[in-house]
Amino acid sequence: MVRTSSGSARGTASREAILQAALRVIGRAGLAGASLSAVAADAGTSKPALLYHFGSRENLLREVAVMAVSVFRTLLEAAGDEDVPARRRTEGSVAALFSPGNRTLLVCVHELVGLGMRDPEVGGLLARALDEATHIPAKSLARIHGEQAESLARSLIMAVHGHVELWLCSGDQDPAPYIAAATRTALAILATPAPR
């Protein structure tokens, strides 16, 4: 319990608990249903507590976007790991991306991309989230691909994301064909020769 300035006791949830609640609400009800009240109720906290942590719905959505887009980091981290054969690490990271535990994050990315196409502010938010998600892991790609690492990292994420979108929109519960297609695409991108 936290005492507010008015002296009343209010339950408060951690930032992480609120982010997880936002992911669940967006996964269930889409962005339109992700009001501050709905997220606060799912997190078991109050709207003022949510505002205390994030300041606004836009800030909350920004952090959700960064968290959701970061699910693709495993692709980049695996791509830069030279200790494991390229095919095996790519197959493993793509399969892990499609795991049931990531579905809520992937649905959030899907919802945010849809809104980003109609709303330039959300589109910018996603672009910044993608920058944050690719910047550090792209450094590991730089050893192999030099100056192309950042654009290669974005290409890898966007291409695999396309296969994720096809899977989510298909309603197909079996991701195996989409995993196979995404893996082939990722391997083709990673085979891009380093600049001379």
Image (tube, rainbow, N blue to C red):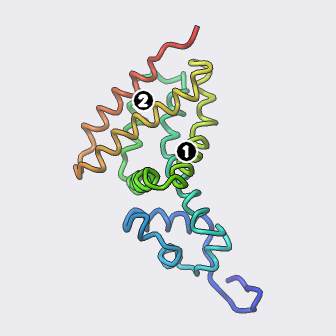
Residue identifier under label 1: 127
Residue at x 35% of width, y 52% of height: 100
- For the residue pair 188 and 12, the one nearer the viewer reads as 188
Residue at x 46% of width, y 36% of height: 157
**SS under mark 1:** helix
Q: Are marks 1 and 2 in contact (CB under 8 Å)?
A: no
Percent x, y of residue 127: 55, 44
Q: Is residue 107 left or right of residue 56?
A: left
Q: Residues within 10 Å of mark 1 (few under 14, many from 20)?
A: some
Residue identifier under label 2: 90
Residue at x 44% of width, y 17% of height: 191
Q: Amino acid at mark 1?
A: Ala
**Quadrant in which the N terminus appears:** bottom right
Q: Is residue 170 left or right of residue 136?
A: left
Q: Amino acid at mark 2?
A: Thr
Percent x, y of residue 156: 46, 31
**Quadrant in which the C terminus appears:** top right
Q: Which mark is residue 51?
A: none
Disc 1 vs disc 2: which is toward the camera? 1
**SS under mark 2:** helix
- For the residue pair 125 and 88, the one nearer the viewer reads as 125
The earlier-in-sequence mark between 1 and 2 is 2
Does residue 183 sit above or below 173 in this rendering?
A: above
Q: Residues within 10 Å of mark 2 (few under 14, many from 20)?
A: many
Residue at x 57% of width, y 42% of height: 133
Does residue 194 sit above or below 175 in this rendering?
A: above
